[in-house]
């Protein structure tokens, strides 16, 4: 998928604005480009549907309305966790500073265009665990990355309650006793940024670090009789 036309061909036959369609992309380094392909493919779908129904192409005002309605309707997730990528997979294609700036630009656009049903980043502990972190370290790195994004967005003038709903988490889970810490995602509120406590924390942050966030866990099982790892990955929305 190298061009917008490739993306439109890929999604042909799927109504990307349908309420029962959600597209999640495990992509990090080139995430801003792939996300742009996806959003523009969805917009072009709706513009083409308008043209087919009306017998003419939309005028500029109608096209702008189609674009805004499409952005408000599309559902899904793009991983785009560049800090995890640097820590756990080493597959960055841009510098951290530039990648963070692009993430901030995208989040500002999401706020401006009221993109409420799409997660702009999936803050991922799974790949940190795959790189060798134990459950406690996985949680520590993942939450530290999440706090970094929150602090960076705030430094650019974005209010927490405007962007927190666009953040999601992705953890690895297993049978080890240490994994119980991942079930207590609300605990870090005690040491959240700036000494924020549960009583003073903005509403969205309280939701973010409680179980009301979009939380996906991949459950991993290691059979005693085989070195082969069996992975079952149910998606959980708590």
Image (cartoon, helix red, strand yellow):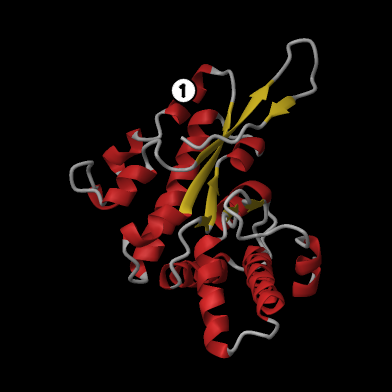
Residue occupying the far front of the picture: 54
Q: Is residue 97 visible?
A: no
Relative vertical location of residue 232 with respect to residue 123 in this rendering, above or below: above
Q: Residue at x 67, y 51 (%)?
A: 26
Q: Secondary structure at mark 1?
A: helix
Residue occupying the far left of the picture: 199
Asked whether, in this view, residue 170 is left or right of residue 34, the answer is: left
| Residue 162 pos. (x, y %) | 35, 62
| Residue 173 pos. (x, y %) | 57, 28
| Residue 178 pos. (x, y %) | 50, 22
Which residue is at the front of the view, 235 or 197?
A: 235
Q: Which residue is mark 1?
A: 180
Q: Residue at x 23, y 41 (%)?
A: 198
Total tally of numbered discs in the picture = 1
Relative vertical location of residue 137 with respect to residue 51 in this rendering, above or below: above
Q: Is residue 113 visible?
A: yes
Relative vertical location of residue 15 with respect to residue 42 in this rendering, above or below: above
Asked whether, in this view, residue 111 is left or right of residue 10, the answer is: left
Q: Quadrant of residue 31?
A: bottom right
Which residue is at the front of the view, 38 or 137?
A: 38
Q: Quadrant location of the N terminus? A: bottom right
Asked whether, in this view, residue 124 is left or right of residue 10, the answer is: left
| Residue 154 pos. (x, y %) | 34, 64
Residue occupying the far top of the picture: 225
Relative vertical location of residue 145 with respect to residue 49 in this rendering, above or below: above
Local packing at callout 1 (Cα closer than 10 Å; few below 14, some 14-19, many 20+) is some
């Amino acid at each position: 998928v190298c061009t917008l036309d490739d993306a439109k061909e890929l999604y042909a036959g799927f109504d990307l604005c349908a309420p029962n369609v959600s597209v999640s992309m495990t992509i990090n380094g080139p995430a801003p480009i792939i996300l742009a392909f996806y959003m523009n493919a969805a917009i072009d779908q709706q513009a083409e549907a308008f043209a087919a129904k009306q017998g003419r192409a939309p005028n500029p005002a109608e096209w702008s309305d189609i674009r805004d309605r499409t952005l408000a309707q599309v559902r899904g997730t793009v991983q785009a966790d560049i800090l995890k990528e640097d820590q756990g997979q080493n597959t960055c294609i841009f510098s951290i500073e530039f990648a963070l700036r692009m993430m901030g630009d995208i989040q500002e656009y999401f706020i401006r265009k009221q993109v409420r049903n799409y997660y702009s980043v999936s803050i991922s502990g799974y790949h940190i665990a795959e790189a060798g972190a134990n459950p406690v370290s996985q949680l520590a790195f993942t939450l530290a990355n999440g706090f970094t994004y929150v602090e960076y967005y705030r430094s650019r003038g974005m209010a927490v309650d405007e962007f927190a709903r666009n953040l999601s988490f992705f953890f690895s889970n297993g049978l080890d006793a240490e994994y119980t810490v991942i079930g207590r995602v609300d605990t870090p509120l005690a040491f959240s940024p700036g000494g924020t406590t549960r009583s003073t924390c903005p509403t969205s942050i309280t939701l973010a670090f409680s179980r009301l966030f979009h939380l996906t866990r991949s459950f991993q099982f290691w059979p005693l009789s085989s070195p082969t790892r069996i992975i079952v990955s149910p998606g959980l929305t708590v």
